[in-house]
Structure formats: structure tokens, C-alpha cells
Image (cartoon, rainbow, N blue to C red):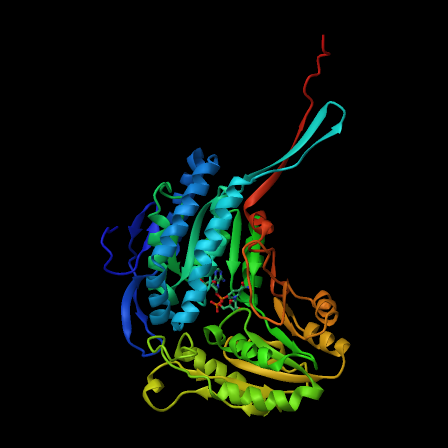
Amino acid sequence: MSTTQTAAKHWIDGQWTDSDEHRESVNPATGEVIGSYAMAGPKEAQSAIEAARRAFADPAWRANRLLRAKVLNRMADRFEERADDLVELLGLENGKTHDQGRLEVAFAPETLRFNAALALTDTGTNSQVTDGELSMVVRQPVGVAGIIAPWNSPVALGIRSLAPALAAGCTAVMNLPWQTAQTNSLIAGLVGGTPGLPAGVANTITGGHVSGDVLVRSPDVPTISFTGSTATGRQISAAASANLKRVGLELGGKTPLILFEDADLELALPIVVSALIVFSGQFCMTGSRLLVHEHIADRVRRDLAALLEAVKVGPASDPASDMGPIIDKPNVERIDKIVDDAISQGAQVMVRGGPVTDGPLAVGAFYRPTLLEVTDNSMPIVQEEVFGPVLIMQTFTTEAEAIAMANDSQYGLSASVFSRDVDVPLRVALALESGSVWVNDWARLHDQFEEGGFKGSGVGRMRGFAVMDDFVEFKHIRLRPGTTPAV
Ligand code: NAD
């Protein structure tokens, strides 16, 4: 145990905690080592669970919603005060341009304040079902929440699960990914050091699948809030079923962007580019499928190719960069192999993009945006999430065909519809098998509206008024008061 921050550490039971194993954090834009961190294994995960369990046993937190609201609001202030530092670290460690970093960091205080308000508006239902007899439902926190978040947006996604867990009265262990250990350490300190937060209520460890698996299998963790890939979500769901624990899953996506014939292309195409390059295509909602009405396909091919070729790839430290690096070089190779395979299977190359192999950027994990066109919806490049800046274009003739193509997917996280018509966008939005649909826009999220996936994109919802459901039990109490007759 140590109180000085020489390497990024875990925050367990109200203090910085070290591990036996230390690793190095690397800047993906340069390959340079930027710090070291303590890596959690089963021991750290277990001690965090025990701290959270002790904190839950004490009613100081779970029975005091005023305290919870106050602490969440203070936490929001702390994230706001250190926003620039978080943006800086996300640039250095996660490769996000500062604009994109600010986009991510801005979510944290908003989410914390929304959940502070939810902590104060806890109401159940009650009814006089039979004359003189009352039924009521109270919501009670389930206990220790296990939170597992991925590296692509650790600030926004960690807090997206932590805030409702704490608002509900749970205590928590947050397993943040080793790829963003330096950022995790700042998050852990901002959360853990919030005045009024009892020790053990919010524990943060930096780990991976080993520490994550301890949370998933522990009988002392009755709920898991997981954000990550669909494949891992399936494994977690299966492992958690041994203890019949509840599991909230926010998983992968293959977001279709549908351009109807009457779309305003001056508006739409820059949005299509953003949808592809924000977080370097490593966003669950990355716009990775472009469905285009055949009458506007030629113009889209030409104008979109020009826009994608003009995207300036570079480090976050350069304010002129439109898109930063991929998380690491192995992922650059993985993405490029998927693109090569698609081309060998018949995909037409509109913009090849690919790894940057010469000049000063060659030392980093840079990948230029890629645009391929295909006609076969069953190809892996259409059906599988790439998690990189690779856009697949297809054409359609009728509205029904566009809907069928968009829905022919294991995923159902989000979609965008571009049209100037009054009726078409709503009709299509209602028909899409998708948790979020934006009309003439992309990836607009608000804490008061539910976010989550249909089909293989998830189970349950984050944000909105449904957000607490993963963290509470509903208890029905039936009262038969006044059984003695009135005098
Ligand atoms: P991943 O599923 O490989 O891992 C996510 C995290 O889960 C890891 O950091 C690790 O700590 C943990 N983990 C991995 N295997 C585990 C196991 N067997 N048991 C317990 N924990 C385990 O995902 P990734 O590659 O880090 O993230 C990218 C994926 O996340 C993409 O598929 C993306 O679409 C998805 N994602 C979804 C959302 C959403 O809100 N729907 C948001 C962001 C990212």
C-alpha cells in the first residue's frame, strides 16, 4: 500500500493501492512510454469487492439519498474542474484529438448531475388495491455493482455505469482497462477523493479480463454493468448465469447511415465523415455502413471520397489533426487485414486509406479512413464490427429495401436517417431494429433519454429513467392496516 502516486494505482477502500505487477503505458501516436501502472489481478479485484461489501453493509450510504445526491454533484464539479487534464491524458494515452476528448469528458459531469437528481426523485408506486388495504413497491439497491468499461471512452463509459449505481445506493467496483491506466488513475482520484464519499463505496481498479472475470463470478457482486464487445458480452452473460446475477450489456454495433434521395448532402456528408472518424472509428456508434439511394450514389461516391481523402490524420498534440491514432499497432494490423480480406472477397475500393507507413507518423498507430463499396449484405465486412475508420457503402432503390438491408444485421445499437421529407424519417426510424435513431444527425446522446441496443448490441439501458433498473430490486409490500374496527 502506498500514499504517493509514483505509478498509476488502484483506489480501494478509500486509498491508493499498489500491485505486485507493474506495466508501462504507451502513447499510441509515438510509441513512447508515458508512465507506469499497477495491473490488477484476482487479489486486487477481491479486495475491492470486500471493501465494497463492507461499505454496503453500513447504511451510511445506501440509506441516505441526500448524501448520495450531494456527493454525486460534488463529483460532477470535480470532473468539470479537471476536464482539461482529462482531455490532455485522453490525447496522450488514448489518441483522441482534443475536440474529441472534450466531447467525451463533457459527458461525465452531466451524467453525474442527472443521477444526483435521480437519487432525489426515488418514487415507487402504491395503490389501495382493495378498500382499506394498501400495496406499495419500494426500490432497494442490490448491493455491490461490478462495472466493466472498455478503453475507447473510459471517462464517459465508466461514469455512465458508476453514477446510476451510486445514485441507487449500491457500492461499486469499477474495472477500467489497462490501455488507459493513466486516465483511470485520474478518474479514480476524482471519484474516490470526493468529499463525503465513504471509504469503500466507489473502488476503481485498472485491469483486464482476469480482474473483470473475478467481478463476474463473485457471489458478492449481484449485478454487472458491462460495456464492451458482443463476444465478451456473451461470455460474461454465460459466466454470470452461474450465480443468476443480473447483467446490463452495452455492446458492439454496426451503425447504418441511410441517405435518401432527397437528403441534404451538404449537411449529411460532413456528418458521415464525423461518424466515421470520431475516436478514429473506435466508437460503438461509429457510422460504418452507408446505405445510399441509387439516384444520388455517383455524387456521394465522388464527394465523400474527396472529404475522406482530406481528413488530416495526426497526433492529438497537433491542433490541426482531424483524427488521432488507433489504440495500438496490433489493432492497425487487425483492421488492415479485415480490409484486405474484404477486397479479396470482391469489395470495390473507393478510398483505400490504411496504415501510415512513411514520414514522422509511421512510428505511431495511424490508419487513414477507408471507403469500400459492396453489393452483398452477407459479407463479413458488412456484418462484423471493424472498430476502425472503415466505411462500407451499399446502394438501394426503395425505402423497404433500405430498411431490410439495415435490419439484416446481428447488431441494433444505432442508426441515422438523412432525408428532407416529413414522413419518411419517422416511418423508417420506427421500422429500424435499433436502440437509437437520429434524423439528419448522428450520435446525439442525452442523459434523460435511454441508450442501448436491440439484438446483439445489448441488454438493458444506460441513461434515461430506466438507468437504475440494473441496480435496484423492486419489493412489493402489502399492508393491511387498521384491522380493528373504528370506534
Ligand atoms: P472487450 O469486450 O474486448 O473488453 C472490454 C473490457 O472487458 C476489457 O477492457 C476487459 O477489462 C473486460 N473483459 C474482457 N474479457 C472479459 C471477460 N471474459 N470477463 C470479464 N471482463 C472481461 O471490448 P474492447 O475491445 O475493449 O472495446 C470495444 C468494444 O466495446 C466494441 O465492440 C465496441 O462497440 C464496444 N462498446 C460498446 C459501447 C456501448 O455503449 N454499446 C460503448 C463503447 C464500446
Question: Which residue is at 26% across, 61% downward?
Answer: 7
Is 109 left or right of 11, judged from the image as shown? right
Q: Nearer the viewer, residue 50 or 159?
A: 159
Q: Is residue 163 above or below residue 425?
A: above
Is 426 left or right of 231, judged from the image as shown? right
Q: Quadrant of residue 397?
A: bottom right
Q: Quadrant of residue 481?
A: top right
Question: Which residue is at 60% across, 73% downward?
Answer: 254
Q: Position of residue 95 (x, y in %)?
A: 38, 73
Query: How many numbered badges does the structure rendering display?
Result: 0
Q: Is residue 82 above or below residue 302?
A: above
Is 280 left or right of 293, judged from the image as shown? left
Q: Position of residue 58 (x, y in %)?
A: 42, 35
Instruction: Using the rendered image of the protein, determine whether residue 345 is visible from the camera's viewpoint.
Output: no
Q: Position of residue 19 (x, y in %)?
A: 30, 57
Q: Is residue 29 above or below residue 135?
A: below
Question: Which residue is at 64% across, 91% downward?
Answer: 298
Instruction: Using the rendered image of the protein, determine whether residue 290 is visible from the camera's viewpoint.
Output: yes
Q: Nearer the viewer, residue 320 or 242?
A: 320
Q: Quadrant of residue 158?
A: bottom left
Q: Position of residue 62 (x, y in %)?
A: 47, 38
Which residue appears farthest toward the top when viewing the image? Answer: 487
Please state, as top left, top right, bottom left or bottom right, where the C terminus lies in the image. Answer: top right
